[in-house]
């Protein structure tokens, strides 16, 4: 599989006029060649030439892992040595001194600055748009892992929802979700539990705030399976939250469904955002929908394509992304509903189960 991805990636490099790619993040290198090494503060890069050649420069302590991943050409350096001469030697071998080099977005600045100083006449550019041409469209095996990760989040929700009670803290609810996901074989990645006025903050930091009677609670969480992420948001109430909360829930659910219904291979990403936003604007809450409708997801929790106004990229079959409209009334409450969907040729597949049809009162 890795050999096939390197071959397709080298075609992307050629078509974009890039001479070589320099990876750094374990996610990118793992995706392209099965190299999940993390260099930390040490210089480590998986280099891919437009012709398809692969070379790794890494600390000596990572060399055996690189070779086990099938990298045949490895230059290693020891602590106390300067790795930059290895980089320059590779650049000379690949004729890159005046080349165009695409660099992983996660390459630390201190390393990129040394690379730029070593090759002052080369042009450096961000690699993520190139990598994402491959990563954004999931292969069947990747889709299976995405479905498993989504199912574990769904099941965790079914288990934890009836246990949520007045008096528990946001952190306690988050801990229950972590345990439920881990117990099913998922690797929990995050859980945002936002109650009462905190639910009006889209990226609320969960703390010891207790859940109170009448609170709206936004719960956003996910896990990884086999390196692939899930991400789901559900909104519930404790006791009676009042009529407006129920109405806002209905509007957000309708926007969520409208966004999903707009999704299909060939449709622009911004069309999905517009379909969801239109519902919220028509209901008079447009100014309270303060973020994009969604983000791509895969080995990264947030990745391309982004479902946002201005993104005229067309969805392709196998794109996995969130549809997560929300309405946030400052100081009062918020509602967000999020499923992950995969675009198909004739529509979409929801990887998550259906959200509750009405604002559930626990
Ligand atoms: Zn989320
Ligand atoms: Zn999300």
Image (cartoon, rainbow, N blue to C red):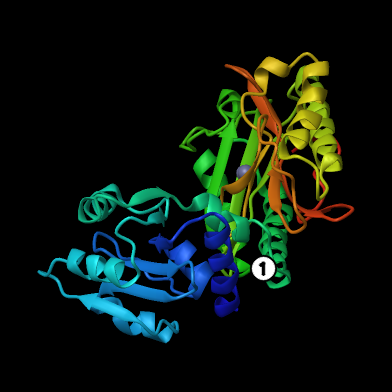
The residue tagged with tag 1: helix, strand or loop?
helix
Q: Which residue does the numbered mark 1 point to in the structure image?
A: 142
In depth, the one of 6 and 254 nearer the eye is: 6
Name which quarter of the figure residue 70 lies in.
Answer: bottom left
Residue 325 image point, x, y percent: 71, 33
Q: x and y percent of residue 72 in the render?
A: 39, 85
**Quadrant observed for ligand 2 in the rendered image:** top right
Query: Does residue 229 show up?
Result: no
Q: From this view, report whether residue 288 is shown above or below residue 32.
A: above
Left or right of 198, for residue 328: right
Cβ(mark 1) to ligand 2 < 8 Å? Answer: no
Q: Residue at x 80, y 42 (%)?
A: 267
Can residue 347 be seen from the camera position used here? yes
When the figure is inspected, residue 74 is found, relative to residue 278, above or below; the finding is: below
* Quarter of the image that includes the N terminus: bottom right
Q: Residue at x 31, y 51 (%)?
A: 108
């Amino acid at each position: 599989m890795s050999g096939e991805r390197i071959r397709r990636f080298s075609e992307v490099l050629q078509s974009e006029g890039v001479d070589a790619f320099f990876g750094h993040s374990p996610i990118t290198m793992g995706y392209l060649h099965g190299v999940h090494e993390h260099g930390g503060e040490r210089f480590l890069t998986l280099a891919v030439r437009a012709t398809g050649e692969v070379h790794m420069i890494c600390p000596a302590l990572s060399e055996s892992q690189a070779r086990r991943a099938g990298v045949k050409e490895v230059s290693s350096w020891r602590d106390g040595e300067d790795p930059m001469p290895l980089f320059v030697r590779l650049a000379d071998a690949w004729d890159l001194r005046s080349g165009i080099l695409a660099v992983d977005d996660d390459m630390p600045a201190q390393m990129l600055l040394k690379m730029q100083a070593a090759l002052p006449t080369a042009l450096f550019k961000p690699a993520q748009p190139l990598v994402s041409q491959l990563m954004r469209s999931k292969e069947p095996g990747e889709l299976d892992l995405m479905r498993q990760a989504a199912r574990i989040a769904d099941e965790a929700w079914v288990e934890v929802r009836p246990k949520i009670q007045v008096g528990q803290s946001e952190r306690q609810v988050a801990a229950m979700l972590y345990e439920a996901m881990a117990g099913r074989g998922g690797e929990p990645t995050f859980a945002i539990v936002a109650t009462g006025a905190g639910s009006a903050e889209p990226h609320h930091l969960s703390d010891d705030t207790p859940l109170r009677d009448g609170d709206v609670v936004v719960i956003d969480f996910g896990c990884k399976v086999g390196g692939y992420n899930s991400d789901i948001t559900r909104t519930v109430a404790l006791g009676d939250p009042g009529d407006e909360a129920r109405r806002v829930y209905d509007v957000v659910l309708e926007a969520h469904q409208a966004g999903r219904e707009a999704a299909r291979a060939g449709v622009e990403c911004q069309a999905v955002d517009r379909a969801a936003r239109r519902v919220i604007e028509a209901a008079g809450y447009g100014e309270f929908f303060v973020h994009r409708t969604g983000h791509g997801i895969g080995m990264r929790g947030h990745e391309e394509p982004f479902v946002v106004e201005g993104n005229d990229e067309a969805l392709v079959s196998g794109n996995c992304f969130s549809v997560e409209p929300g309405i946030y009334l400052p100081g009062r409450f918020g509602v967000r509903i999020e499923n992950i969907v995969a675009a198909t040729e004739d529509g979409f597949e929801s990887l998550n189960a259906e959200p509750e049809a009405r604002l559930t009162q626990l």
